[in-house]
Image: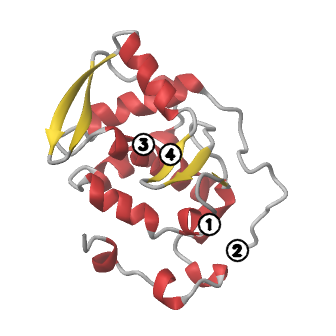
Amino acid sequence: MAINRSRPAYNREFNRQKLEQVLLFFLHRANNPLLGKTKLMKLVYFADFDHFEEYETSITGARYRKLPQGPVPDEGMDAISNLEHNGRVSRTDIQKGSYIQHQYTPNEEVDLSLFSPTEIAVLEKVAARWREHSTEQIVSATHGEAPWVAVGMHREIPYYLAHYRNNFGALELDEDEALLDEDEVFAR
């Protein structure tokens, strides 16, 4: 497949309303005791990059940055804070070992009319795939993907790297860091 790198790396305008609705979607469809803020941000990443990989457009238009716990949308923390501030979600802080996990409960339904059928299908697929995985497992999974591996810490992650997520050889990475099977990704 020929990758068109001349297109803007973030091929649509950022849509805050859609990002907030994606967050609400996952709070409704993937919410369980394993879902905290870190995992929530990874679900948004998977939705945007999965949709881009298949349809050449992201869902939210968010820009992602490589952070120690995996890719995070630049606007993600503001979006969840805005939802909380406006009473659209409620936050509960749970002690989890040595850290506090921020868990959110949605106080409104998702507006699915904002999404195309392909976007809804990808959101459903991401929710079903990752619902029962821990934060550590989803963080490990993102760390094994080309978009996270290929850029420096705190750098923006270009969407076109989504096309290399299942084809690490194209990035010419060292064999020991590129060829991870599912058991190795979830070994933690």
The Cα atoms of the two marked residues, 1 and 3, are separated by 20 Å
Residue beneath disc 1: 163
Residue beneath disc 4: 72
The three-letter amino acid code for the residue at tag 4 is Val
Numbered disc 3: secondary structure: helix
Numbered disc 4: secondary structure: strand
Disc nearer the start of the sequence (2/1): 2
Disc nearer the start of the sequence (2/4): 2
Residue beneath disc 3: 41
The three-letter amino acid code for the residue at tag 1 is His
The reply to whether discs 1 and 4 touch (Cβ–Cβ < 8 Å) is no
Above or below residue 53? Residue 156 is above
Q: In the picture, which quadrant includes the N terminus?
A: bottom right
Numbered disc 1: secondary structure: helix
Above or below residue 30? Residue 188 is below
Q: Which of marks 2 and 3 is in front?
A: 3
The reply to whether discs 2 and 1 touch (Cβ–Cβ < 8 Å) is yes
Q: From the viewer's perspective, tell me whether residue 99 is left or right of residue 74.
A: left
The Cα atoms of the two marked residues, 3 and 4, are separated by 6 Å
The three-letter amino acid code for the residue at tag 2 is Met
Disc nearer the start of the sequence (1/4): 4
Disc nearer the start of the sequence (2/3): 2
Residue at image location 65% in from the left, 32% down from the top:
14
Disc nearer the start of the sequence (3/4): 3
Q: From the viewer's perspective, tell me whether residue 82 is left or right of residue 26.
A: right
Q: Nearer the viewer, mark 1 or mark 3?
A: 3
Residue beneath disc 2: 1
